[in-house]
Image: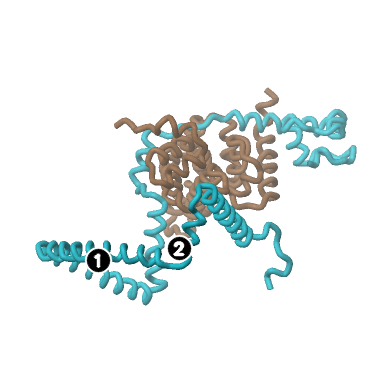
Amino acid sequence: MGARMKRPHDAHLTADELDALLEGAPGDALQAHLFACHDCRSTAEADRYAVTAVRSLARFQPSAGLADRVMSQVTIRPVALDRFILRLPVWVRRDRRSLMRAASVASVVFGGMAASTVWSLMNRDLLSLWGSRVVSLFEGRLWNGTQALAASVAAQPWYGVIRDTLDSPGRLGMTATILLLGYVSGLVALRRLVALPSRPVPHANW
Amino acid sequence: MAEPSPPQALRDLTDQEVVRHARAGREHAYRELIRRYERPVFSLIYRMVRDRELSEDLSQETFVKVLKSIASYRPEFKFSSWVFKIANNTAIDHLRRRELDTLSIEGSPHAMTPEAVEATALQLGSSRASPLEALEAKELGGTIEEAIQNLRPEYRSCILLRHVEGRSYEEIAEIMDLPLGTVKTYIHRARNELRVTLGHLRKH
């Protein structure tokens, strides 16, 4: 600040020095000059007087109902919706062909869905009959399939080895621990692989 | 009709938090922003244009602009600076329009008859002297207000923002879209003029 800098002894007050005086932070040199220079002392006093007078001005109150008058001219909507509405015409102008394609796809999809809903409502009995046939067919097939899968697994040569390994609680616990450790180390390794470098890599912007 | 006041909880929030609520579409937040700034904005505009009714209209215009463009407000700036910027621009735009209407002390260049010339010349001449405006000056608080009214509009904005609203030089530069050096110059010139104008009061 100008007031704190070394000032020529006989120079009159600068604007920055007047500010420093207002803020109550004059340097020693400035105070010495004020003591010696009647003109500057008078200017500083007049400046303080003028600023104090301006600072003493009260704020005015507008008439009651300003908020109501303002609110009657403002439509309240969330900004996200506002932005969407504002940008919609821009998107339409910018990418008319893509928009037409999207509209065609949307009309086919939604039209199909609407037709399907109407048809379903008109043919409820038929749908219910088809449903019960499908359920009974799959119930039988699902049970037979599960049994066949279990028999096939039990017939495999490695099945006996695994069953013997997990036979006692100690071995089961040890195997679980090894698997868990393997899983955790895998996670840690993956995390280090995908972490972003904390410092910029030199020449990374080739 | 009683004006619905914003809930007490909003009054404790910072400007930025209230703005967030307003951006989410809450009417109470809009009203809270008006409540916080109606007096500073109205006072600034009133001291700029010297007409209560007009100041009401311009304040209303300011808040409508603020609230309609709240989506474009960037939270990294002080909300109060943004509001004052809109208020100041609204007042200055009005003064410029008015100045265009009363361009010449000899009368408007568009005036076709001697009566019209006289009428437009009187508009400018009366800006400090008509009984109505003298009454307004009295309402505005006498000599100090008059001294401020006699400053150039740019000086007036700067001095009011600095010493009535307590804004920093940097904020004023942002509000008025001026370089920092220009703001400092305007404020010091304005204070020079005020020192001279108010000098006689100090001697009494």
Colour in which chain B is shown?
brown
Label for residue B95? none
Question: Of the residues shown, which amino acid type is indicated by label 1?
Answer: Arg
Q: Which corner quadrant of the image does residue A90 belong to? A: bottom left
The answer to the question of whether label 1 and label 2 lie on touching residues, with beta carbons closer than 8 A, is no
Q: Quadrant of the C terminus of chain B?
A: top right
Identify the secondary structure beneath mark 2.
helix
Supply the letter of whichever chain is cyan: A
**Circle 2 crowding by C-alpha within 10 Å: few under 14, some 14–19, many from 20:** few
Instruction: Please state if A1 lies on the left or on the right of B109 as rendered.
Output: right
Which of these two is toward me, A83 or A188? Answer: A188
Which of these two is toward me, A88 or B86? Answer: A88
Instruction: Please state if A151 lies on the left or on the right of A27 as rendered.
Output: left
Q: Which residue is mark 2?
A: A159
Residue A51 in the image, given as x and y percentages of width and height: 66, 32
Instruction: Please state if A7 lies on the left or on the right of A145 as rendered.
Output: right
